[in-house]
Image (tube, rainbow, N blue to C red):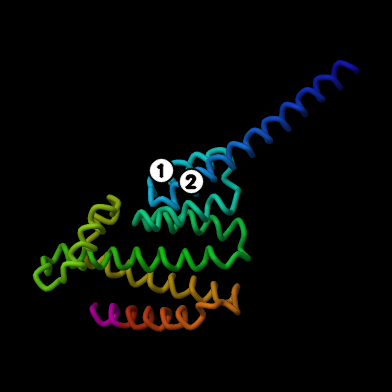
Amino acid sequence: MKRAILIITVLFIAVISTACINNFAVQELNNKAQMYLNNGDYEAAIDRLQASLDLDSTIYETNYNLGVAYIKANKYKEAIDVLKKAAEINPERSDSYYSLAVAQESYAHQLLNMNIQSSNENNNLSEDDMDETETDMKTADDTVLSMSPERRKITARELYASAMSSYKTYLEKAPDAKDKEQVDSEIKSLEEEIRQLGQCE
């Protein structure tokens, strides 16, 4: 009996020690990732945050910060996935819905810019628009690149609708948000984008 108690005690101490080491490692990785984010090294931040998620995927801040890093790196599909998880972990945090809306809207823009690129309308684009389109082509994943232009339009419209919903949820969670007027204006802009895409069919 004493031996069984000793074994249970040793196992309990081992589990607690491992949890403490993991928490310390997660915090160190998150701190390093924040430093990289602040310095604009988004790929290094993504690497650290993914390593942190490998240790503990249930921490809201890690998921949220990874979503922000993906947005900054123009990897919107990945941002959407991880920000949805952040919202699941802590559904009362309004910032995840705002960032999710930004990722969804940016991904839709990326898809539509690729349609412009693929239809060779570059002659009518400003230099800034051409740079943005080239960036979109470089950061797009294989799934997007294999989509037909019509499928991209449909997906963009769906993303705009999702972004509207995410912005509305953000305002529900943060009714006193300082940027309420700006977000309301963005919602109206998305409604117009959806309407125009519906007319293109």
Of 124 and 117, nearer the camera is 124
Q: Residue at x 60, y 49 (%)?
A: 59
Quarter holding residue 88? bottom right
Magenta span of residues: 196-201
Q: For residue 33, which numbered disc appears in the image?
A: 2
Q: Are marks 1 and 2 in contact (CB under 8 Å)?
A: yes
The disc at residue 62 is: none
Instruction: Look at the numbered disc 1 and give the secondary structure of its residue.
Output: helix
* Location of the C terminus (image quadrant): bottom left
Relative to 97, is 67 above or below? above
Q: Which amino acid type is marked by label 2? A: Ala
On whether residue 199 falls in the magenta region, the answer is yes
Q: Position of residue 102 (x, y in %)?
A: 42, 67
Whichever of callouts 1 and 2 sits on the residue coming sooner in the sequence is 2
Q: Which residue is mark 1?
A: 44
The number of numbered badges drawn on the structure is 2
Q: Nearer the viewer, residue 158 or 34?
A: 34
Q: Tag 2: Cα neighbours inside 10 Å, few (<14), some, or many (≥20)?
A: many
Q: Which element is circle 2 on?
A: helix
Q: Residue furthest toward the left?
A: 123
On-image quarter of the N terminus: top right
Q: Quadrant of residue 87?
A: bottom right
**Residue 194: image location, x then y, percent:** 34, 78
Could you tell me residue 15's position as x and y percent?
71, 30
User: Residue at image x 38%, y 48%?
Assistant: 41
